Image (spheres, grey):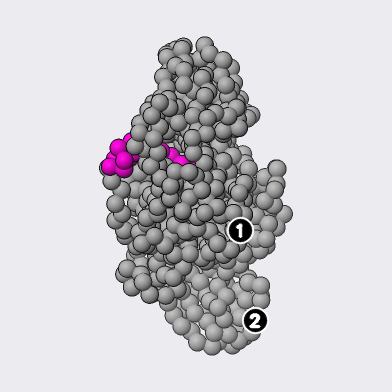
Amino acid sequence: MKKVYLFAIAVIFAATMSAQSIKPNQTFLPKQSFPTNEISVVERTPAGPTFAERGGGGIIFSEDFANGLDGNNGFGEWTIDDTADGTIWQVADDNSPAGEWSTQTGALQSTTADNGWMIFDCDRYNTQFAGSTEGSIDGGEAYVDVEGTLTAPTMDFSGINAVVVEWEHYYRFCCNDEHPLTIEVSNDGGDTFTRFNAGGVNPSATNSFSGTISQSVDISCVAANNADVVIRWAWRQPDGGGDSHYVWGIDDIKIYENETGNDITIGNYASYTDYETTGTYEYGVWPFSQLVELQAAANYQVLGTIAQPNASLTVTVGDFTGSTDPQELFYPTCVDDTLRVIGFTPEAVEGMYDVTFEIASDSTDASPLDNVRVQSFEVSEFIYAQDNSEITGVFPADGTDEFIAASGFQIFNDVTVYGIDVALMNGSDAGTDVIAYILDANLEVLEATNEMELNPEFLNSTNATEIVWTTFLFDDPIDVSADTFVAAGFNHYGGNEVQVGESKTVPPQSCFVNGDFGTAGFDWYYTTEAPMVRLNLNPNAVQTPNDVTNLKDKEGNRLFQNNPNPANNITNIRFELVNAGEVVLEIRDMTGRIVETRDLGTLGTGVHGERVNTSSMEAGLYTYSVIINGSRLTKTMVIAGN
């Protein structure tokens, strides 16, 4: 018998507004205030081509920090300011970077790093708060959100029509999805500033360091032909704060006149669904049933000094080609404009599809490679996935953690869900009981599959090119109506080692994990790395072979299924000990809240049972665990309406 669910798609956005990103296990304090003068924010793409790639240009200013803050530039000294009285920005030393999260990073590998470089070392400052109460604002163990500026001496750009700033740097930030890296430029001596993106195209350094890279930004729209220019590198907290971790290292700064004439580029936004406008996720795999008309979009920036006539964006995917109307684009500008191509629907033919974005004008472009951007997606008859079948990591880092990993899906057309597919990773313990769910827009369980024992023949390495999927089938197919939101979830109860694959970067509030992973404790959090958990829409899907028996741990202790299940007022929980041990019984609801715990003391070898009164528990899905000498065995049970 099929089961039918209808939920408003808008609910997910309201329901998950309080969901949080995965963070190191720290408590974040309120953002400290920091004087920023008057700031106009420019989400401007860095200029792309470096000084060498541009074929040179007149160098106006250079700095290698050989003299530290005293400067080695011919203009004057540098100044620093931050929320810790100038102790976060530092001239790097032999220990840089320092602090509990960054000690293994190593020094910046810039061209002249040996004679000095600058570092904004959040971790060195914040480590004093980790594991102690000293200095923390609320008396807890907490990192503090920080901000700070590194300011160059004032410069005169009179008579200079095009100004580009270039530097070498590395960075890592955490734990807001928006990066904190900016360059701020003033043409009135520092009274007002315009802020430019200093993090590159789509920076993502929350999971690993960027490595040493060259970065450039054209600041002509503020600095050109002005005599009182102030430039500063600033670590700024994004909305919501949270970027309190890791470091930013900077060296080998050049400021030069842009001598490039014809140059336009695709900026830091290209989306084959125009996600920022439409809200439609860029799914890695689209099933036939969910193919809808899409619009593609990309922003652009004029990098050369000459206006570009008859410029347009062309989008090509499969047999479709669409272009925007030609227009003239001008330099300099402090605005990234977005061009949109509307009206393509992916073909209902299985395979991989490349979406090619290309911007061009009547002029011959000096740097044509940055005029093209390519995205890819797959079309499948029956698979709906956030991931793109490429493993980029594993979740969770500690596979013994209890967790649910869930990928969210917008349902555009009526569909029937038959199962959940999961990419389980090497190192997961064979025989571990696992289960999958379909969740609603509030991330509450709609239906659970049967538990299965993890099959060791269905595991994947991190470099796998062909993914082996474990398929969990529902007893009854689930009909989901159009204009709803559901999530595919996978649950590991903890104890044994189990990990799932992670894939491509996804927008906030589209994929989620449940567990003890952040500041709220055991709760739902969003993740920007797609868990490899999919909807299976195939009516002929086959359950992964497994032997569903009572759960055992590595020592041979066994936990049996509760009886009766579903439970109505009373249920019995039985377990077997191979050796005598200290035992605790624990029952949790699906939010992770403990609803009952019993310290059973030391029990001897053999089978034991506990009678549990469920009459005060609300109907729904629960987990029950026996913790034997610190080792946990967990299964699920259903509480019927009492």
Image vertical order of residue 298 relative to residue 91, above or below = above
The residue beneath circle 1 is 106
Residue 533 spot, x, y in % from top left = 55, 47
Closest to the camera, between mark 2 and mark 1, is 1
Q: Earlier in the sequence, mark 2 or mark 1?
A: 1
In the displayed structure, 459 sits above or below 202; it is: below
Q: Is residue 443 left or right of residue 430?
A: left
Which numbered dot is residue 578? 2
346 vs 576, nearest the viewer: 346
Q: Are marks 2 and 1 in contact (CB under 8 Å)?
A: no
Q: Secondary structure at mark 2?
A: loop
Disc 2 crowd, CA 10 A, few/some/many (<14, 14-19, 20+): few
Q: Nearer the viewer, residue 576 or 436?
A: 436
Residue at 53% from the left image edge and 64% from the top image edge: 98
Q: State the residue at coordinates (55%, 52%).
A: 66
Residue situated in front as seen by the camera: 302 or 348: 302
